[in-house]
Amino acid sequence: MIQRYPEYSHLREKIAKYAKGVLEGRDVWCINFLNNITYNCDCFSGKQEPFMEDIGILMSKDCVALDKACLDLVKKQKGFDPFKATYEIDGEYILNFCEKLRIGKKKYKLVEI
């Protein structure tokens, strides 16, 4: 069953604006662990079952490029966007919004180590 949460777009935009404030003027590395990937946020209580195999650990100085790479890798491994299919949440929307805020760019080069 699809759970719909499009009404939370304003919340995601607010979070992006706050992230911009935190990141502005700072030299940071962003790290994402693509392990034990579940449909829900890690903040949900209780044990969640992963819905796909682990991908690995990614890092970048550009958090938008990093999130774009992570989303692309999940979609590539699954063959579709599981978050959009489950919650009707388009991850590209918030990445585009972040790019407009100049938090970072969606363009990336994936280098495997």
Image (cartoon, rainbow, N blue to C red):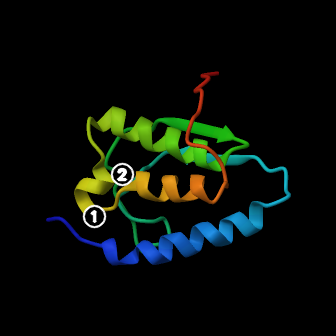
Q: Nearer the viewer, residue 64 or 60?
A: 64
Relative to 18, is 28 above or below?
above
Give percent across and percent down for residue 100: 58, 56
Give the quarter of the image for residue 41.
bottom left
Residue 89 shown left or right of residue 72 in the figure: left
Cα gap from disc 2 to disc 1, whole angstroms: 16 Å
Q: Nearer the viewer, residue 25 or 80?
A: 25
Q: Residues within 10 Å of mark 2 (few under 14, many from 20)?
A: few
Relative to 35, is 20 above or below?
below
Give percent across and percent down for residue 15: 58, 72
Residue 108 shown left or right of residue 90 in the figure: right
Question: Which residue is tagged 2?
Answer: 50
- What residue is drawn where x is 44% and y is 44%? 71
Residue 79 shown left or right of residue 65 in the figure: left
Give percent across and percent down for residue 96: 50, 53
Residue 64 shown left or right of residue 36 in the figure: right
Identify which amino acid the numbered label 2 is placed on: Pro
- What residue is drawn where x is 60% and y is 22%? 112
* Quadrant of the image containing the C terminus: top right
- What residue is drawn where x is 48% and y is 77%? 11
Q: Contact, CB < 8 Å: mark 2 with mark 1?
A: no
* Quadrant of the image containing the N terminus: bottom left
Question: Which residue is tagged 1?
Answer: 87
Give percent across and percent down for residue 48: 37, 62
Identify which amino acid the numbered label 1 is placed on: Tyr
